[in-house]
Amino acid sequence: MSVIVCRPEKVTRPYYVEDLGVNIYSSQEFCYAIYHHPMLFMDRFDDQNLIDFIRDQLGMGFAAARMEQRMKAGEKSVELMFLFMQECDYYTAAELNRFRQLVTSLKKLPPLEYAKRKTDYLVECKQYGRAIAGYQAILEAAGDKKDDLLAGLVWNNLGACYARIFQFQKAMEAYDRAYGKKKDLGLLEKMYHLTLLDSGLELKERYKSLISPQLKEKWDRDFDEAREKAGESPQLKNLQELFRKDSVKRGEGAARLVEEWKQEYRSMA
């Protein structure tokens, strides 16, 4: 995420937004993050630690006092968020009006669909571990409710999260559950590709009979193309370039690269 810094405040303890991997050092940065990522902040403003940051670090004591008063009166988090953005005076009235309309429309979604939208956003931020927990909570809350479409989408997204952190067995199980809710050929393709990624996995017999030789040939070709494309990724090229350097620079570069991978994996899991 890129952030435009307009008026740095004397922040000694920045507010860390884990979902975005950024530290907030000014009210303008905070407004920018909220405006462009509302799903991450709509339910966050009824937190005393956040209000303390606004008062003590951003120097917005009057706004923090109003927010505290309203929070104690039972005001919803989203209204506290609107109050903060108005006090910052970073966006125009027209921009804030459009923002309020967007947020209001999101809050009007049915609870489970709203929860799914929030969890989908965690996936976009590569917070796969937290997204997995979110999808599992949605499925648990849904119970035996007959909403096969929503359940199918959640199981599908859960499978994608597992696949991205290399838990292929769990991904296969999730896609299998998704297919039980919605007979989607795309799900069969994902399960088939998982068997190519993990030789220990095998399609169920009932699925094998649904895959024609023509489909199998196409999916094999798509898989090979994806693998070739992955081989051309900037990350792999950076690694190849790293090993062309002398031993000292290679060691330094490798250490930095490994640390970057560790940080990325921690955020995913």
Image (cartoon, rainbow, N blue to C red):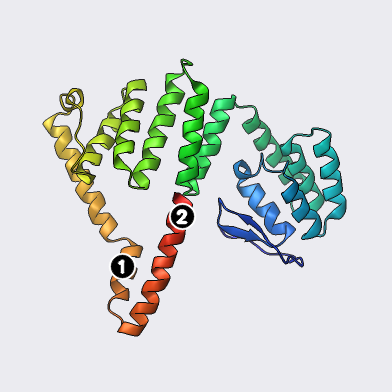
Residue corresponding to mark 1? 237
Of helix, strand and loop, which one carries label 2? helix
Q: Residue furthest left?
A: 213
CA distance for labels 2 and 1: 23 Å
Q: Residue at x 49, y 26 (%)?
A: 140
- In the rendered structure, the answer to whether residue 28 lies left or right of residue 106 reads right
Q: Can residue 40 be seen at all in this image of the molecule?
A: yes
Q: Where is residue 129 in the image (x, y as percent from the top left)?
A: 46, 45
- In the rendered structure, the answer to whether residue 161 lies left or right of residue 172 reads right
Q: Can residue 89 be seen at all in this image of the molecule?
A: no
- Mark 1: give few (<14), some (14-19) or many (20+) Cα within 10 Å: few
Q: Residue 266 carries which label?
A: 2
Q: Nearer the viewer, mark 2 or mark 1?
A: 2
**Quadrant housing the N terminus:** bottom right
How many discs mark residues in the rendered view? 2
140 above or below 63? above
Q: Residue at x 86, y 41 (%)?
A: 69
* Residue 159 found in image quarter: top left
Of helix, strand and loop, which one carries label 1? helix
Q: Give the mark nearer the N terminus: 2 vs 1.
A: 1
Residue kind at label 1, given as amino acid type: Lys
* Residue 163 found in image quarter: top left
In-front residue for pair 3/111:
111
Q: Residue 154 carries which label?
A: none
Residue kind at label 2, given as amino acid type: Arg
Q: Position of residue 82 (x, y in %)?
A: 75, 42
